[in-house]
């Protein structure tokens, strides 16, 4: 038996040693966990050195088979006019995991419904209407009285069975009844809400036969985007105007830090026929013109969304580092035209609280564009035929000039007169309303008409505009009132939380995401809202949106993001409630990126498109990326609550008389029937698989379908290329253009030295330097980067290493005193 003094001595030595060993193991695990998100080559190399055998990931999707019944109606919803039912979108959704030699994937399929079915029509009292074409999934009926008609579709009446060929499993779908209520009222024809364009002869896409002169870096894009104007640019008159329909928009998942202060906001535009010459005649951008503007120069309230229209004025360029596609990059003006409800001002004499369908245009002018034209460097925008002339400084401008007139078009919803004419009824054209709000210059308007289509031509004279940036709103539409405001509804959107499945952080120094994250919905006043902008704040698991009251870290309480009236002073405010006509859909889009310097990752896009109904829902994100641009993954939780209608307007005699002009009753014969075309124009990007959703359809998690396009891979950028491509570009420059190599690497080093001063992103910098050293030839690294010292990683997130050491020394001292007394 050991003497008491020996035991005491062992405790004095052993306990502190055990304490230090526990700390070492803890910090070691923190470092190892960070390897999960490293670039694969670097990750594999470090795992091999450390002897780590990573756990296999879970299957990307379940084995599942389900029926997705979708049914919608079209027509005027007036007596004696046909109402068409379409359930042809009904499908079976099948998903199953796939397993390869070293990879796992997910296959999904949408299988058209081809089983038995039957129809039933429940009529209001006094009606003798019957369903026609009931042997198809697209029947119709002609209502003969006002009231509620209920259409029922019974699918799989004798069960539907599915036996996958590759899996020993039997799926059985029981009989399912899908109902659709259709309210028929005597009254006027509801307004169309989507803009209509006049016929345009159009221009052909531009063919660029030889880009060698315009894109001097086309052979080697110097592992970063390089930008050059398509034509010689000498001043504001050389900007090009682009008009078209937005096919998608989002914040870029990553941009090269050497020519971006922050990431770009991207708009994918399908140009109108008269602007097709701005798109290049090749397949890389599929006839689209991309618009890019750093997001802090392009505020959330003016950003467009898919389905909107835009008028864009800016530099027309080749993006030589991205397959030489044509872009407007950067703009100096964007007008986002949205099909939204508008309120007719009382001073026009038609009444108060009068709402109708219209176009809301948000106009934004800004001389600043970010680093592409704010930093005269080799990676900025250069002038055509002069690759040494960065813009706009080389043309003696301190910022992007806007001293010119710009004319753009606001296309209106269908003239109600044209709608009635299709149905054989003659009515006059209603008055046209347009007005600017908060205008920094007074717009000039001209009403144009061609082939029965009316639109508004707007001219802004910016020659005397002395500000740096400003915005205005223009509302336009037909004055077309109704006693019930066309049943305009208000809906509250609430987003309390999201389940983060993969935060996509690099993992150094800790496994926590640095997210910049936006929500987008169609509520007119504030359609984009940044809901996360934080460092080391997103962990895997349930994340409730919250506010911390003390020092930003203490006394945190869950505060959901929601819409509401501005007078409510909502802390997490998504803007006003959604205002939707009964024929309009609700959408929700969420996207952003995990900010990891050169290795920022797309956190994925969650998107929803449905007709609004009360309830709690969720949407799983999806992501399209290459190995070197990882993907986050999450499920967004949201709810919709019906707030109520907008209330009836207080129509004056003038307003009531205008409505009576379009009323269908015994004074005017019924509209001619049958007419096949629906009056209300639906968008061409609906759910699922681009098909129109029914009013009563729930949002379905189609992982293979997307309503808001994602950003494609960019393998020719430093942020997106593989190590092999990186090394190949270095070798090319070493041999063919050593001066260019020196200029680019010198600039890259300056950017890295600047970033090393930011202690918040020290872990990202550590991985970036490791990646560069791993990919560069030793002689290149030694020449340009060997004097850069690696940042010291914090052992505990948010706590400097010196503080951890001081705490450890203090604990050891206290332990020494404690055992010394014994």
Image (cartoon, rainbow, N blue to C red):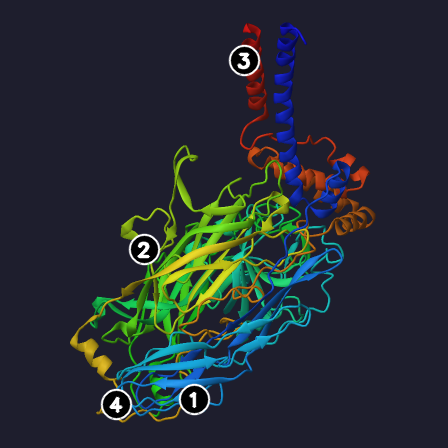
Whole-percent x, y for residue 207 in the image: 67, 71
Mark 1 to mark 3: distance in Å? 87 Å
- Checking the image for residue 234, the label placed there is none
Work out whether 230 lies above or below 298: below
Pick whichever of labels 1 and 2 is earlier in the sequence.
Answer: 2
Mark 3 to mark 4: distance in Å? 92 Å
Q: In this figure, which residue is indicated by the disc labeled 1?
A: 676
Mark 4 to mark 1: distance in Å? 25 Å
Badge 4 element = loop
The residue positioned 53% from the left and 39% from the top of the image is: 536
Work out whether 779 lies above or below 390: above
Whole-percent x, y for residue 200 in the image: 51, 80
Q: Nearer the viewer, mark 2 or mark 4?
A: 4
Pick whichever of labels 1 and 3 is earlier in the sequence.
Answer: 1
Q: Nearer the viewer, mark 1 or mark 3?
A: 3
Pick whichever of labels 3 and 2 is earlier in the sequence.
Answer: 2
Is residue 463 shown to the viewer in this render?
no
Whole-percent x, y for residue 42 in the image: 73, 43
Mark 2 to mark 4: distance in Å? 42 Å
Mark 3 to mark 2: distance in Å? 56 Å
- Checking the image for residue 814, the label placed there is 3
Mark 1 to mark 2: distance in Å? 39 Å
Mark 3 burial class by Cα count in 10 Å: few <14, some 14-19, many 20+ = few
């Amino acid at each position: 038996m050991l003497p008491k003094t020996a035991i005491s001595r062992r405790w004095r030595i052993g306990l502190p040693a055990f304490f230090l060993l526990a700390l070492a193991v803890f910090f070691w695990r923190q470092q190892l966990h960070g390897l999960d998100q490293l670039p694969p080559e670097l990750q594999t190399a470090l795992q091999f050195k450390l002897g780590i055998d990573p756990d296999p990931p879970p299957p990307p999707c379940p084995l599942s088979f389900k029926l997705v019944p979708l049914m919608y109606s079209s027509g005027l919803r007036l007596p004696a006019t046909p109402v068409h039912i379409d359930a042809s979108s009904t499908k079976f959704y099948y998903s199953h995991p796939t397993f390869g030699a070293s990879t796992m994937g997910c296959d999904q399929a949408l299988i058209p419904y081809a089983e038995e079915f039957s129809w039933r029509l429940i009529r209001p009292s006094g009606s003798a209407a019957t369903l026609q074409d009931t042997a198809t999934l697209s029947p119709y009926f002609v209502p003969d009285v006002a009231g509620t008609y209920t259409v029922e579709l019974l699918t799989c009446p004798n069960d539907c069975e599915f036996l996958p060929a590759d899996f020993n499993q039997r799926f059985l779908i029981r009989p399912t009844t899908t109902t659709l209520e259709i309210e028929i009222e005597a009254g006027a024809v509801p307004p169309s809400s989507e803009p209509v364009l006049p016929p345009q002869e159009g221009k052909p896409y531009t063919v660029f036969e030889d880009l060698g002169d315009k894109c001097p870096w086309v052979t080697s894009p110097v592992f970063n985007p390089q930008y050059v104007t398509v034509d010689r640019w000498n001043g504001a008159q050389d900007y090009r105007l682009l008009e078209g329909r937005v096919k998608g928009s989002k914040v870029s998942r990553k941009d090269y830090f050497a020519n971006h202060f922050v990431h770009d906001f991207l708009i994918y535009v399908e140009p109108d026929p008269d602007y097709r010459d701005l798109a290049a005649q090749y397949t890389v951008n599929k006839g689209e013109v991309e618009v890019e503007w750093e997001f802090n120069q392009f505020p959330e309230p003016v950003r467009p969304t898919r389905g909107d229209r835009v008028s864009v004025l800016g530099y027309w360029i080749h993006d030589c580092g991205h397959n030489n596609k044509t872009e407007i990059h950067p703009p100096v003006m964007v007008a986002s035209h949205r099909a939204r409800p508008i309120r007719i001002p009382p001073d026009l004499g038609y009444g108060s609280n009068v709402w109708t369908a219209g176009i809301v245009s948000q106009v934004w002018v800004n001389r600043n564009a970010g680093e592409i034209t704010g930093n005269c460097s080799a990676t900025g925008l250069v002038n055509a035929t002069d690759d040494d002339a960065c813009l706009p400084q080389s043309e003696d401008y301190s910022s992007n000039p806007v001293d010119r007139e710009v004319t753009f078009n606001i296309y209106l919803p269908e003239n109600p007169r044209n709608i009635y004419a299709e149905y054989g009824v003659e009515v006059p054209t209603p008055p046209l309303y347009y007005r600017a709000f908060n205008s920094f210059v007074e717009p000039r308007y001209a009403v144009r008409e061609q082939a029965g289509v009316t639109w508004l031509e707007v001219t802004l004279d910016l020659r005397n505009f002395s500000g740096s940036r400003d915005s205005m709103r223009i509302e336009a539409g037909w004055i077309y009132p109704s006693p019930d405001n066309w049943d305009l509804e208000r809906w509250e959107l609430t987003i309390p939380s999201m389940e983060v499945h993969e935060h996509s952080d690099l993992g150094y120094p800790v496994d926590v995401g640095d997210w910049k994250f936006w929500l987008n919905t169609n509520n007119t006043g504030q359609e984009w809202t940044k809901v996360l902008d934080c460092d080391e704040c997103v962990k895997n698991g349930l994340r409730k949106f919250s506010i911390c009251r003390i020092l930003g870290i203490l006394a945190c309480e869950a505060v959901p993001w929601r819409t509401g009236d501005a007078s409510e002073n909502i802390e997490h405010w998504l803007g006003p409630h959604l205002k939707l006509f009964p024929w309009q859909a609700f959408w929700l889009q969420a996207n952003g990126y995990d900010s990891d310097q050169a290795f920022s990752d797309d956190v994925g896009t969650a998107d929803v498109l449905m007709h609004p109904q009360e309830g709690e829902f969720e949407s799983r994100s999806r992501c399209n990326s290459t190995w070197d641009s990882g993907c986050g993954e999450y499920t967004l939780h949201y709810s919709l609550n019906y707030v109520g209608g907008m209330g009836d307007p207080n129509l004056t005699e003038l307003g009531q008389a205008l409505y009576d002009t379009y009323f269908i009753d015994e004074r005017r014969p019924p509209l001619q029937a049958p007419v096949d075309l629906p009056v209300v124009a639906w968008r061409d990007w609906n759910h699922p698989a681009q098909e129109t959703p029914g009013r009563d359809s729930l949002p379905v998690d189609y992982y293979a379908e997307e309503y808001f396009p994602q950003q494609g891979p960019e393998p020719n950028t430093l942020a997106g290329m593989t190590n092999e491509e990186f090394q190949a570009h270095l070798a090319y420059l070493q041999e063919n253009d050593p001066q260019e190599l020196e200029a680019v690497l010198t600039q890259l080093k300056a950017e890295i030295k600047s970033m090393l001063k930011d202690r918040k992103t020290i872990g990202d910098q550590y991985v970036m330097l490791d990646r560069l050293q791993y990919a560069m030839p030793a002689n290149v690294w030694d020449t340009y980067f060997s004097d850069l010292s690696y940042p010291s990683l914090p052992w505990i997130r948010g706590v400097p290493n010196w503080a951890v050491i001081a705490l450890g020394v203090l604990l050891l001292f206290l332990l020494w005193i404690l055992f010394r007394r014994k």
